[in-house]
Amino acid sequence: MDPNRVLIFDTTLRDGEQSPGISLNTAEKLEIAHQLARLGVDVIEAGFPITSPGDFEAVQAISREVEGPIIAGLARTHVADIDAAWEAVKEAERPRIHTFISTSDIHIEHQLQTTREDVKGQARAAVAHAKQYCDDVEFSPMDATRADLEFTAEVCAIAVEEGATTINIPDTVGYTMPAEYTAYLERLYALVPGLRDVVLSVHCHDDLGMAVANSLAGVMAGARQVECAVNGIGERAGNASLEEIVMLLRTRGDAIGGVHTELNSRELARSSRLVSRLTGYVVQPNKAIVGRNAFAHESGIHQDGVLKERETYEIMDATTVGLDSNAIVLGKHSGRHALRQALEDLGFTVSGQALNQAFARFKEIADRKKQVTAMDLEAIVTDELREEIAGYTLEWFDVEASSRRPPHATVGVRSPEGTEMTGSFTGDGPVDAIFHAINSATGIEAKLREFRVDAVTAGQDALGETSVVLELDGRSASGQGVSTDIIEAAGRAYVRALSNAVRRRDVAEREALEPSAL
Ligand code: KIV
Ligand code: ZN
């Protein structure tokens, strides 16, 4: 392999999915995995199969369907975890088992309640067991940056001896600093000569805002795999942001010996929008690379400079991250064939009933909105995909809003079993009224925690995209909706959030009766 190539290991669907409030179902995970394959990531960590039947099913579906990247499943060092990870990934073109155990004393004493000797034994047994199934085995000494380096080196040497092909050094709690991490990895190379024969990987969390800087320090020390997530989502403050790593290596790789990735950076903006839409995690406007303002110029001096020569104030071209791809693709006279072609150009293969459904929705939107752009289509397709998996659906609504009377809403909601239920409510505003009317129709007393409206594109007739986070029995769940009508988009988002909340409650109740392995 090219010694300067840095592999991108995407953990959006595993570490990213562990972010509070995110719970993606299999169809949503598959959609993200297909997009990651279009983006050209080298490895997709699709989930942690032992943790729940839902996680197992999603990893298995991704392994069966998604071509291109290596598909990895996470496992503790337990035999049952490794068996579940293998069962879930074994049908992938290129499967990987990723197994981990902590090497820091703080974890060994307090969490694992065991000894260093036992950790060494578990690491050896786990890698050997995984190797019986799969050539490609990754090993991570968790919390390595707070662990004793000599001991971590002993554990890594054992993993290499047993055949691990990638050794990943996680900064699990986002504690290290660039120079310290470089020194750590250089010392590790000195202590574990076999490390030169495998891929060294870095996995950095962002608790101190250092995840990308630390990952870069890792690459400078010799790491050739970076673990990261789209939009930087992940446990607590998140993981290193994939788009920042990719554009950093693309823009400044020459300054660090020519290191580079093989990703198709033009898919970055779209990947970011999809992940944000499906997780409900908003991308801050000034977020590097994919934020709405990442290429916007406000001050007169800057605008003047950019108009004369883009490079005066831009170190990257927006087209290289895919921010130019919002051409008008369709209008209200476009037919089914044109829609199918436009969707195919965007990378969606839609046929049969799904195409009929997408076409009906497209016509409804094109009637209200003159021009339908690529970004509109993306939003519509993602919205339609959710329709299939939602438990409850909003069938119709009536909302009366006036400055002289309290707003009133009546709704018809179809239950997962197919019954139509109606409910009415007089609220503080039209959106509040429709949300309470949905609670009244379903008989579920969910509490609204967050509500947000964004425009998919600019313009007066822009599609509105709403996001709702609600709470049911102490658990939060999110849902999104798209329409030219904000009230309708809000209602759609609310019933989806409610469906997700009910599904999560049901899973938790089942797991309480039959505890899973974690
Ligand atoms: O942060 C971490 O240590 C992890 C491991 C499972 C690699 O996510
Ligand atoms: Zn992590």
Image: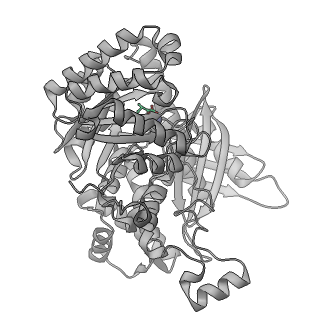
Out of 185 and 24, give the one closest to the viewer. Answer: 185
Out of 299 and 354, give the one closest to the viewer. Answer: 299
Answer left or right for 325 relative to 137: right
Q: Colour mode?
A: one colour
Q: Is residue 486 above or below residue 57?
A: below
Would residue 416 be seen by someone viewing this image from the given angle? no
Q: At x 26% / y 54%, what residue is drawn?
A: 3
Task: Point out residue 470 in the picture as x, y percentages from the top left corner.
Answer: 61, 38
Out of 454 and 384, give the one closest to the viewer. Answer: 454
Q: Is residue 57 above or below residue 224?
A: above
Q: At x 32% / y 47%, what residue is drawn?
A: 30
Q: At x 38% / y 17%, what residue is drawn?
A: 516
Q: At x 52% / y 36%, what residue is drawn?
A: 235
Task: Point out residue 64 in the picture as x, y percentages from the top left corner.
Answer: 20, 43
- From this viewpoint, which residue is outermost toward the right? 404
Q: Is residue 257 above or below residue 43?
A: below
Answer left or right for 41 relative to 390: left
Rendering quarter of residue 438 = top right
Answer left or right for 502 relative to 168: right
Q: Quadrant of the C terminus?
A: top left
Answer left or right for 512 relative to 404: left
Rendering quarter of residue 163 = top left
Q: Is residue 84 above or below residue 337?
A: above
Would residue 327 be seen by someone viewing this image from the given angle? yes
Out of 168 and 266, give the one closest to the viewer. Answer: 168
Task: Point out residue 56 in the picture as x, y percentages from the top left corner.
Answer: 30, 30
Tally of numbered tags: 0
- From this viewpoint, which residue is outermost toward the bottom? 308
Task: Point out residue 480 in the picture as x, y percentages from the top left corner.
Answer: 53, 51
